[in-house]
Amino acid sequence: LGPGKIILLEEIARSGSISAAGRALGMSYRRAWLLVDELNRLLGSPVVATQLGGSHGGGAALTALGSEVVARYRALEQAAEC
């Protein structure tokens, strides 16, 4: 777990989309999805909940675990700066 994955999760939370988050960070949807999948496997539970597309398109949001991972990472980062 490192800053790149945390930034990706934050961007997914902001944009509501894995593909939009990937584009904003200059990576392909596939790369973004592989990073999310790696986190899901590492933590044993999903960090992102996805909704299939349709006439209005799909979407993605952080799960409670995903939000907690980001918050804890940022708290550790703050503590390390002191």
Image (spheres, rainbow, N blue to C red):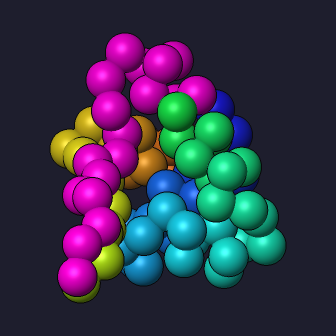
Q: Where residue 38 sits in the image (x, y, percent)?
A: 58, 28
Residue 59 found in image quarter: bottom left
User: What residue is at 37 percent from the left and 15 percent from the top?
Assistant: 44
Q: Is residue 36 above or below residue 11?
A: above
Q: Is residue 53 above or below residue 65?
A: below
Q: Where residue 61 sits in the image (x, y, percent)?
A: 29, 60
Residue 47 found in image quarter: top left
Q: Is residue 76 toward the left or the right of residue 43 in the image?
A: right
Query: Which portion, as a residue range, is magenta?
Result: 38-55
Q: Nearer the viewer, residue 48 or 69?
A: 48
Does 40 lie within the magenta span?
Answer: yes
Quadrant occupied by the N terminus: top right
Does 7 lie within the magenta span?
Answer: no
Is residue 44 at least partly visible in the picture? Answer: yes
Q: Where residue 58 sits in the image (x, y, percent)?
A: 30, 69
Q: Is residue 17 above or below residue 7?
A: below
User: What residue is at 73 percent from the left and 62 percent from the top?
Assistant: 28
Outermost residue, front direction? 55
Task: Count every numbered label the image shows and give the total.
Answer: 0
Q: Is residue 45 toward the left or the right of residue 37 in the image?
A: left
Q: Is residue 5 above or below residue 23?
A: above
User: What residue is at 51 percent from the left and 18 percent from the top?
Assistant: 42
Q: Where residue 11 sits in the image (x, y, percent)?
A: 51, 70
Outermost residue, bottom direction? 56
Q: Nearer the viewer, residue 32 or 10?
A: 32
Q: Nearer the viewer, residue 22 or 71?
A: 22
User: What residue is at 63 percent from the left and 40 percent from the top?
Assistant: 35
Q: Is residue 80 toward the left or the right of residue 51 in the image?
A: right
Is residue 77 at least partly visible in the picture? Answer: no
